[in-house]
Image (tube, rainbow, N blue to C red):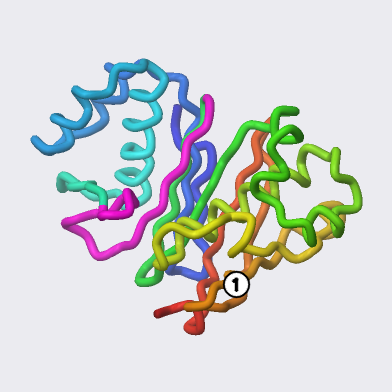
Amino acid sequence: MSLLLNRKIRGDVQIGVWKIEETPAQLLKMLHLTPMEEKIYQTIQNEERKKQWLSYRVIIKKLLNLGKILDINYDKQGKPKILNHYLRVSVTHSGCFSAAILHKNKPTGIDIEKISPRIKRVKAKFLSQQELNEISDPEDLETLHTYWGAKEVIYKLQTLGIISLRKHIYIHPFDLQNTNVIYGEIRHENLNCLLKITVERIEDYMLVYSVDKTRECDQ
């Protein structure tokens, strides 16, 4: 499978989505893992997890269209980083999809999640009482997954460390029938800022990402 989505935004942002139809062996042939990556890969036992882990590396390689080997590792918060390239990266995977977003110089975030009724059972764990009161239809799966995805995106791009999705991240009310752009806030004693977030549906998955991290968010 080639990139299902390969998009450039404002020249300094690239987004790729991959529908995983390959075996781990087929994905491995598209890559040149570093010795450290090879070591990490050998610890992954689950077949689906192997494909997800490899596929987002394939996405990054194809988005950059580089011949050199990319050395992808993780920081102390578990966020991926490209050690031998200047671009910032965020990745996500769910089911048969993986996705990545690259930004020229600012942190960013991306999330993809399969739409599932299960989210209704856990909504109180990531939504504040204010948000629950503001949702026009608390049973709508797309809306709930948009809230979840938006909060995951903000969590990924913030640099405070461990914060609460329910207490420290607030998503403004939105109507997916009229817009695919929503807004979220970090509300924390050490940081407060507003972020613009984009939402779109791909098959039975919700893709959410942010490419608009303001200076006020930087520590």
Q: Is residue 136 left or right of residue 99?
A: right
Q: Could you tell me which residue is drawn at 22 percent across and 27 percent down?
A: 41
Q: Is residue 95 left or right of residue 200?
A: left
Residue 215 horizontal/vertical position (percent): 47, 83
Residue 1 horizontal/vertical position (percent): 45, 26
Image quadrant in which you'd find residue 185:
bottom right
Determine crowd level at label 1: few under 14, some 14-19, many 20+ residues with C-alpha closer than 10 A: some
Which range of residues does the magenta coloring cover? Answer: 75-95
Q: Is residue 97 above or below residue 64?
A: above
Q: Could you tell me which residue is drawn at 48 percent across and 36 percent down?
A: 93
Image quadrant in which you'd find residue 122:
top right
Q: Given the current orientation, which residue lies at the most extreme bottom position?
A: 216
Q: Could you tell me which residue is drawn at 78 percent across and 37 percent down?
A: 141
Residue 189 horizontal/vertical position (percent): 53, 77
Q: Element type at marker 1?
A: strand
Q: How many marks?
A: 1
Q: Is residue 55 above or below residue 44?
A: below
Q: Could you tell me which residue is drawn at 70 percent across and 62 percent down?
A: 171
Query: Camera-side residue: 139 or 187?
Result: 187
**Tag 1 residue:** 187
**Residue 141 magenta:** no
Q: Given the current orientation, which residue lies at the most extreme right position?
A: 136
Residue 103 horizontal/vertical position (percent): 40, 64
Image quadrant in which you'd find residue 34:
top left
**Residue 84 magenta:** yes
Query: Camera-side residue: 177 or 190?
Result: 190
Q: Amino acid at mark 1?
A: Arg
Image quadrant in which the C terminus is located: bottom left
Query: Camera-side residue: 69 or 195?
Result: 195
Q: Is residue 115 above or below residue 43?
A: below
Q: Is residue 55 left or right of residue 3?
A: left
